[in-house]
Image (cartoon, rainbow, N blue to C red):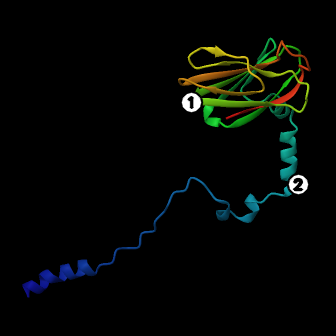
Amino acid sequence: MKKALLLIPLIVISCKKDPNVAEITEKDTVTAAELPASQYQMDSSDSRKRDSVINNAPVTKEVLRKGVMRNEKDGQIIRTADASQLPFTLGEEFTKDDQELVLKITNYNQSSINAKITTKENDFNIRFNQIKLPNGEYDGPFGREISHEIKGKGEVWLVIGKSNMASGKTKGSFSVSVE
């Protein structure tokens, strides 16, 4: 009998069911599928109006015209790009005579650089005037295309401007492609 009394608590404990615990997962984001349709659907005309206001804002137009990471001082335009963005193409425009573009490429760690100036105007007087290497040395002048060996790691500058030994227009739009 004593043995039966000892077995009863063991049987009760082993047969006892744990209550169902509802697992709650915390969410820090909500997907569109979890929201009612009325909360995430927009009228397409409302969306277009908002996009139109943003795209036509004076500040947006100025950023699109001037670009990002761009400074202009005394006829010199300085653009900065990180080498992690390579390859890239950027557009620029000379609006005054004797302007110069200095394209600074930071964190450059490749063994060579290839770049090309493209313009729609045939008589545009523009070229790579100089390249500044990470060790501080300069080389140049070059033409509209450059392929140069780079020793070391650091900042590389591509200096673009007019050729004093040639004639042609010095104002206009152009693009620079760097690989």
Q: Residue furthest bottom?
A: 1
**Percent x, y for residue 134?**
58, 20
Which sits in the foreground, 92 or 166? 166
**Percent x, y for residue 117?**
78, 29
Density class for disc 1 (Cα within 10 Å; few <14, some 14-19, many ≥20) is few
Q: Quadrant of residue 101?
A: top right
> On the picture, is 9 further left or further right than 109?
left
- Say which residue appears at 80% left-offset and 57% top-offset: 42
**Percent x, y for residue 27?**
55, 56
Alpha-carbon distance for marks 2 and 1? 51 Å
Which sits in the foreground, 39 or 70? 70
Q: Amino acid at mark 1?
A: Ser
Q: Quadrant of residue 73?
A: top right
Query: Mark 2: which secondary structure?
Result: helix
Q: Amino acid at mark 2?
A: Ser
**Percent x, y for residue 95?**
89, 20
> Which residue corresponds to mark 1?
111
- Compared to residue 130, the image places residue 148 above or below, namely below
> On the picture, is 86 further left or further right than 165?
left
Q: Which mark is residue 45?
A: 2
Query: Mark 1: which secondary structure?
Result: loop
- Compared to residue 24, the image places residue 127 above or below, namely above
Which image quarter is the C terminus in? top right
- Say which residue appears at 33% left-offset and 78% top-offset: 17
